[in-house]
């Protein structure tokens, strides 16, 4: 995800955001799906993850016109504000110059903005893994698959809660407490496999600041 190698390898622009690994994975998926489109295939990611220093994606390819056009809508750009941590997916035509806070947006992409995994397939994988292995590696794998399954429905990039609390100029609260507060206000909130300090939510950064 280093900006220069990213541009060369994946024909995309990257940014050093606090969710850099999710951004890298989405840029990789964006690249793969653009290659698939050219050959008339739609993609459906069934399991993708970023662990240590590598990305891995598993996907289905389908020759379907309807899915292809749905896929095209999943290829967008992300606009990130380094001042307030605001981020949103936008199509090329809808890109904005400035964030709501007045700071200029930085853009990355094109990238995949859809789901990174299929929860049903994760569920089947979990069952198999728990049958096969009781050792430490098995437990770690179970944890990884469980997190990926839970976070799959939230496509917005995760927030690093240390960064969020730094902006709020307050001490970090426990992850469970953060999740509880967001859920009480009607938002989805989940832990993420991308980072121990990461939280996936469908709340905007402004809603997060207000709630926390
Ligand atoms: Zn901003």
Image (cartoon, rainbow, N blue to C red):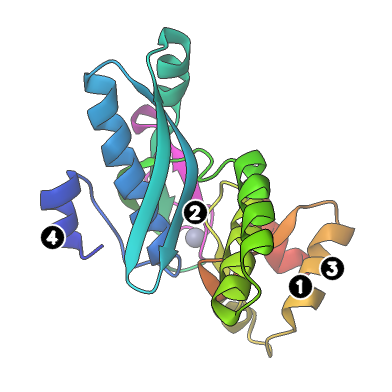
The reply, left or right, for residue 66 in relation to residue 201 is: left
Pointer 4 with pointer 2, Cβ within 8 A: no
Pointer 3 with pointer 2, Cβ within 8 A: no
Q: Residues within 10 Å of mark 1 (few under 14, many from 20)?
A: some
Of callouts 2 and 1, the N-terminal one:
2
Q: Quadrant of residue 133?
A: bottom right
Distance of mark 3 from mark 2, alpha carbons? 22 Å
Where 201 falls versus 38 (above or below)? below
Residue bearing mark 4: 4
Distance of mark 3 from mark 4, alpha carbons? 40 Å
Q: Secondary structure at mark 1?
A: helix
Of callouts 1 and 4, the N-terminal one:
4
Segment colored magenta: 85-102
Residue bearing mark 1: 178
Q: Is mark 2 within 8 Å of ligand 1?
A: no
Q: Residues within 10 Å of mark 4 (few under 14, many from 20)?
A: few
Residue bearing mark 2: 87
Distance of mark 3 from mark 1, alpha carbons? 5 Å
In the picture, which quadrant includes the N terminus? bottom left
């Amino acid at each position: 995800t280093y900006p220069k190698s990213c541009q060369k390898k994946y024909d995309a622009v990257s940014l050093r955001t606090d969710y850099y690994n999710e951004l890298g994975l989405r840029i990789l998926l964006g690249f793969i799906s653009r290659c698939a489109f050219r050959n008339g295939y739609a993609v459906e990611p069934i399991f993708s993850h970023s662990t240590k220093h590598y990305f891995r994606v598993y996907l289905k390819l389908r020759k379907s016109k309807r899915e292809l056009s749905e896929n095209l809508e999943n290829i967008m750009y992300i606009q990130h504000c380094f001042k307030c941590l605001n981020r949103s997916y936008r199509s090329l035509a809808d890109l904005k110059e400035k964030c709501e806070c007045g700071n200029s947006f930085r853009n990355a992409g094109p990238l995949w903005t859809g789901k990174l995994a299929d929860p049903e397939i994760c569920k089947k994988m979990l069952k198999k893994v728990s049958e096969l292995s009781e050792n430490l590696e098995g437990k770690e794998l179970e944890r990884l698959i469980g997190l990926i399954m839970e976070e799959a429905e939230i496509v917005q990039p995760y927030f690093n809660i240390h960064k969020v609390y730094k902006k709020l100029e307050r001490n970090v609260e426990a992850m469970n407490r953060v999740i509880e507060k967001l859920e009480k206000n009607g938002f989805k909130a989940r832990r993420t496999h991308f980072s121990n300090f990461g939280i996936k939510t469908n709340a905007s950064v402004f809603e997060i600041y207000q709630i926390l």
